[in-house]
Structure formats: structure tokens, C-alpha cells
Amino acid sequence: MAHRDDICVPSLETNDMLLKDKVAVITGGAGPNGLGFATAKLMAAQGARVAILDLARAEPAAAAAKLGEGHLGLVADVTDKASCDAAAAAVLKTFGRIDSLINNAGITQPVKTLDITGADYDRILDVSLRGSLYMSQAVLPAMRAQKSGAIVCISSVSAQRGGGIFGGPHYSAAKAGVLGLARAMAREFGIDGIRVNCIAPGLIETDITQGKLTPERKVQIAADIPLARLGRADDVAGCCLFLASDLSAYCTGITLDVNGGMLIH
């Protein structure tokens, strides 16, 4: 960190790593083409020790091994509070601290309003919204004890514009709930030195979208985006890195749009 007129500002020297000696926890991080794994790779490259949390079928330990030595992969279900608490405890046992949490786990379902069942609604909201709450609850005591921490919640442009290509109205509702939850936590935990922010991605090419858009449809969609392309997982990962690092030390309660200009508001 550099100092100027008694104000502490992050150093931007090229040999500095933004997350050196920090510990980052990423939910839903094992998918090879997903936002979570792209974020894990970038954070590891910036000096963080990364804990990837995901369901057993996603093989989080194997994903963590791809990052190199010194990282952790844990089986965890964000819809189960005990599982979240156990995962946080395992990270603390291994690394001794938790500096950032990326609430990335989420699922979607492209259905219309009248086709949403109660089970559909519960399933979609449980992962994105309940999961963000439970995992935040699991790490907040450690962050509060440290008097520092950063939580990044992945929302969606669907929460802002109402609906999307791959998500039904219940997905929009879940991701809108994430925005409200994050802002409320930002107000509550700022006094403890904990920052809570959101990212609202637009249409990003990930595991969820693979094989679901023809090349022609991609061209049509890109034509309506000011930056004239679909997003990449790395586009979101860079913003996660920013919000987890001291570069965003005076940012809390914000929503960072990563949509190429798809929604300008």
C-alpha cells in the first residue's frame, strides 16, 4: 500500500499481487467454463489461497488441484446451512482466515410465469438467494473477528431488466433478492470493516449457455449490445477480483454491471 497525505491507497506497481496472503472462498466454482472457476484462476494468480466449494458431482477437489498447490476443494451444498458452516470451518482450519467470499452458486430455468411450479420456485431461489445468505452467515463471524472482509454476490441483468434468455421470472426474482440481501448486509456490517457488493452479469458464455445458442443467434444478440459481443467468464472474474481487493476499499453496497452495455440505466 502507498500513502499520500495520510490517505492509504493501493499500490499499483506491476510486481504487486492484489490478493497476496489472502484467502478467497468461491461457491459454485468447479465448472471448467464457469464464472466461479475463472474467478478462482484469476484470484490464485493474484496471490490468493482459494477454496472452491461445489457439489460432489462437480468435483471441487479436482478443480482446486488445477490451480496448483496450496488451494482447497470442498464438497458443499449452499442450500444446506450445516454444509455451509462445515465448509467455512474447514477453510478456517486449513488457512486460518477468510478474506473474501464470492457467492457465485446459482441455477436457472427458462420457463414462463404460468409454468413455474412451487418446486421450481423453491429450487431456483434456494441456490441463488438462500445459498447467498447461508454462505455469508458462515463466513461473517470470522470476517467480523478480523475486522475486515469482502463479500461479492453474483446477481444478474435479469434482476434489473425483468427476465432474460435463459432465466424465468423466478430466476429474476432470486437474483433481485440477492441485490437486496447484499445491500442490507453492506449496511449492517460496514462498521466491522466488511464490504458487500454485487455483480450483475449480462449474457456470459459459460457452462450454462454452452450449446444453447446457435452462431446465428449469438450474432443477433451481439448486434443489440453496444460492445458488440457476448461476455466472457474472464470479464466477470476481473470484476470479482476488483471487489475482493483493496482497489475497491471504499465501495460497499454497489452493483457493478458487467453486460457490455446491454442495459444502460
Image (cartoon, rainbow, N blue to C red):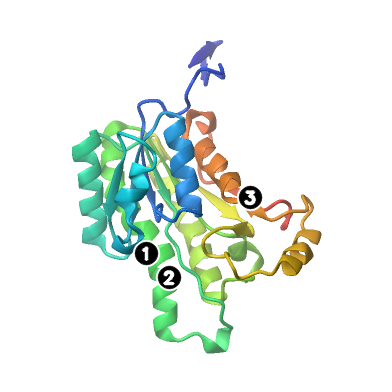
Q: Quadrant of residue 59?
A: bottom left
Q: Amino acid at mark 1?
A: Arg
- Of labels 3 and 2, the one closer to you: 3
* 105 up-or-down from 149: above or below: below
Q: Is residue 229 left or right of residue 235?
A: right
Q: Nearer the viewer, residue 20 or 179?
A: 20
Q: Which residue is mark 2?
A: 125
Q: Residue at x 53, y 65 (%)?
A: 208
Quarter of the view holding residue 211: bottom right
Q: Where residue 136 sits in the image (x, y, percent)?
A: 34, 51
Are there few (<14), some (14-19), or many (20+) residues within 10 Å of tag 2? many
| Quadrant for the C terminus in the image | bottom right
Q: Nearer the viewer, residue 215 or 228?
A: 215
Q: Is residue 255 above or below residue 45?
A: below
Asked if one can make out residue 222 in the rendered structure from this viewpoint, the answer is yes
Answer whether labels 2 and 1 touch (C-beta < 8 Å).
yes
- Circle on res. 130: 1
**Dot 1, how many residues are within 10 Å of its Cα: few (below 14), some (14-19), or many (20+)?**
many
Three-letter code for the amino acid on which mark 2 is drawn: Leu
Q: Is residue 164 left or right of residue 138?
A: right
Q: Which residue carries the number 3 mark? A: 258
